[in-house]
Amino acid sequence: MDELDEEQSQALYGPWDPLQPGQVAELLAGSGVRWWIAGGRAARAGSAARPHDDTDVAVDAGNLGALREHLADWHLWEAHDGTLRPLLPQDTPLKGREQLWMRRDSTRPWRLDILFDFSSSYGPDEWVFKKDQRVRVPWDRALQVIDGISYLRPELALLHKAHLDRPKDRADLAAVRLRPEVRAWLADTLDQVGRHQWAELARLGETPGAS
């Protein structure tokens, strides 16, 4: 399915007013949920910023019960393949669904995009790339803390983005600032998961589609 642009998406689903990372930290404080900032904000952490239409927060899928209890005053919707389904209090998530959108009610904008992370199902010690379980990174190398907030490291966020390969993902690859050894790891891992064009351009410090 072709990706909707921002105007089309808001016309269909309603507007976004994303929580900023500091607001996410305040919201989830005391929840007992393991979470971190993912997506474009993670890819750009420590690099040149850009506007973001939403805020992606990854949570340990095993903590879903605690998350729902903590967010009992919010409305959660399952987002899957261009569709939205309300996750009512008596509902359990449908099999294969890995994403929730959150808002106060139907008159308010969406505030958070919640992504389930299943690394803990493989063991407690490593982040596991959901597209290729061969790619595993110890947690102390998978996350970085900035201003007290955990972010997925940019090179790991870019692994996800390589599979999406949208203009904003290419822009994130172009903007990222990585140490040479980290850039080499990213390029080698992109080759491993079959994203050879991104791998070559990561080595060159260029972006797919650049002249």
Image (tube, grey):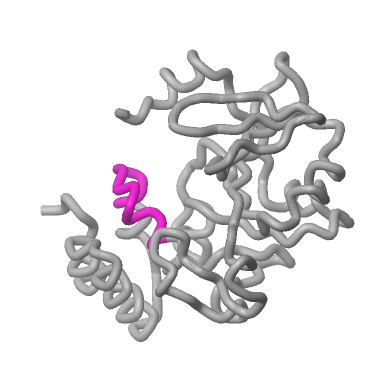
Q: Does the magenta-highlighted stretch encompass residue 185?
A: no
Q: Residue furthest bottom?
A: 181
Placement of 169 over or under 142, stated as above or below: above
Which residue is outermost to the front?
A: 95
Q: Quadrant of residue 95?
A: top right
Q: Residue at x 89, y 56 (%)?
A: 30
Q: How many marks?
A: 0
| Residue under the point 66% across and 55% down | 61
Residue nearest the observer in this picture, 92 or 70: 92
| Residue drawn at x 62%, y 50% as measured from the top left | 57
Q: From the image, which quarter does the N terminus lie in? A: top left
Boundaries of the magenta span: 158-170
Q: Which corner quadrant of the image does residue 70 belong to?
A: top right
Q: Is residue 163 magenta?
A: yes
Q: Nearer the viewer, residue 72 or 158?
A: 72
Q: Position of residue 84 (x, y in %)?
A: 56, 25
| Left or right: residue 204 compared with residue 113 | left
Q: Main secondary structure of the magenta part?
A: helix
